Every structure is written in structure tokens, then in C-alpha cells.
Image (cartoon, rainbow, N blue to C red):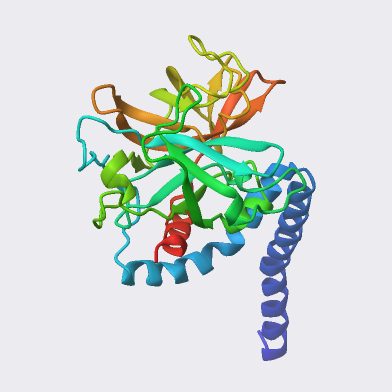
Amino acid sequence: MNKKLSHYLLIVLIAIIVIPNIASVIFQGNNISNTLAFRTSERINEASGFKNKYKRSKENKTRNENKISSRNEIVPPFVSVVNPNHNYPIGFFVADVGSTEDVCTASVINTANGNIGLTAAHCLFDENGNRYNLSLLSFSPGYDNGSNGPLGDIPVVDIAIPNDFLINRFKYDYALARFEFNDPNGGNATLQDYTGALGWRFDIGNGEPTSVYGYPYSGNFEDCANDGEHLCKWQGITEKREIFYAINNITAGEGLSGGPFISQYDTETNLGYAYALMRGYYSISNVSVGSIWDENVFFDILLQITP
């Protein structure tokens, strides 16, 4: 066989091998386009979140340098130092807008700072989507029966909200608040030294026995006045779905937003592990829900709010 013929056959053989692969790539590309076209808006929002993954991993360096742990972290509850027999980390969270007050629920959580709590991110915005001025916000841990808790109203000096909340309010509806607390006894005690603090974790699965607390002024919590003035409790099993925990057949009334989903609640200490916050009620499905926390996002906002 001469050299020209051999060279020609080699070219033909390469073409036979390569062309089907090119066709396959083109076909796969068309499939990708079709997949994107049929995504729901919820899935598009989730995909958008992945754009920040690399930024988050870069920020992990800062988090590690500040010795804030991550990856399935389990932070235990903190028992009050001032009065170990009286823990009251859950309270009334208010935006005082003049003639009215927008009410939610918030909770003190165990942190090195000692003055940090959790609430729903949407509780920090007015009905027009504008963030409340910090001077309008206050927190009264232990509020019940229409009366402030032992420490009265405590001002909010800082808040931290997930960057993606405005993109996907359903998935990222949680936030941290730092309180301006002055020890009534003139010492250096923090807020959690007085109130105790909920632990927190990210590893809760499906079918978790759970207690939820808050101040609903509507809804169907049993044995609850549902008047927005009393701390009420629900106990039952939550269902873990794709981006939220669900409580079936329960109507979360207004004022309950930000109420903690608590695992391993101890009735003697009034403490346990927070793992989600009440977001709202969806009448179509007859379900109340709380966003599943993204651990990286949670630690990022904790880093932001910690002085």
C-alpha cells in the first residue's frame, strides 16, 4: 500500500471515530437547553445560589482564621449563669413603626459573643420590602401574658441577613440579630448569661420530634389564646422536604414568624437545639414551614455579626 493511500485511509478512520462524538455533544447540548427551559422558578433560584459556592469557599479561609467551626456543627444549649433554674431564651421581637407594631418571635442562641439571637429574615423588612431602621427594633426575652420579660425591651444594634434572601425568600428566610445588653447588676454578664440560650445544629432529618414556640395572634395552635400576647407551644413531628421543614395541618398565625423549631426540648431547663425557624403558612397545602439552614450561609452571617 502506497503512502498516499495509507494517509487517506487514516483520515477517513479518524473522521468515522470523531464525527459520532461531535453529534453526541450537540445532542447533549440540546438536552441541556431543554432542561433549563422546563425548570421551575424555584429550581432556577437554587441554581443561581451555586454561583456563590466558590466565593463561599474562599470566605471559609476567613471563617477558619476566626476559629468559627463548620460542617455539621452541633452547639449545645447554654444554661443561665445568673439563674440556672430559670431559662427564657425565647421572646417577643418587635418593629415599632409608630401607630402599630410588627410582631415576630426571636430566640437567644449560644454564641461566644453571648448577645446574639435568631429570627426570620422577613421580620426585618416592612410590607414594602424596605429594611427596618435598627432603632425601631427591640426584643423582650421571656415575654408572656401581655407583659415584658424580666429584662424588659432590649435594643437591636446589628442584623445579618443571607445575601440570597432577596433572591429566594423561601429558601433563606433566617437572620441573626445582635442585642445591646447592659448587665443590670453592673457586671460583664451577657444576655445569654441571664436568659440561657438555645443550642443549634444542621443535621436534623425527616420525622423529628419537635417543639415550636412563638406568639401567634391567629392560627390553630392547641391550648393557645392565639392573641399575640401569650407564648404558645406546638409539639409534633416535622417532615423534611427539599428546602424546608414542614408541619402538616397546622396554621402558623402571624406573630409566630421566627419561632424556633426545637429538637430535644427539655421541659426542665426550657432549652434544646434550634434547627429551623417558622417562616409561614401555605393554605394550598395546609402546611406551615421553616427554611432549612445552609450551614455555610449561617456561619457567614454569624461571622458578619460577631464583633
Residue 40 rendering spot, x and y as whole percentages? 74, 41
Q: Measured along the vertical axis of the image, is residue 26 above or below residue 277?
A: below
Residue lying farthest top? 223
Q: Nearer the viewer, residue 11 or 50?
A: 50
Residue 289 rendering spot, x and y as whole percentages? 57, 29
**If the image is split into quadrants, where does the N terminus sit?**
bottom right
Which quadrant of the view contains residue 15? bottom right
Q: Is residue 121 left or right of residue 34?
A: left
Residue 75 appears in the picture as rendered:
no
Q: Nearer the viewer, residue 49 or 28?
A: 49
Which quadrant of the view contains residue 271? top left
Name the residue at 49% across, 21% down: 230
Residue 229 rendering spot, x and y as whole percentages? 53, 23
Q: Measured along the vertical axis of the image, is residue 306 above or below residue 167?
A: below
Name the residue at 59% across, 30% down: 255
Name the residue at 60% across, 58% down: 163
Q: Nearer the viewer, residue 135 or 224?
A: 135
Residue 127 rendering spot, x and y as whole percentages? 74, 43
Residue 147 appears in the picture as rendered:
yes
Name the residue at 50% across, 10% down: 222
Q: Nearer the viewer, residue 142 or 90?
A: 142
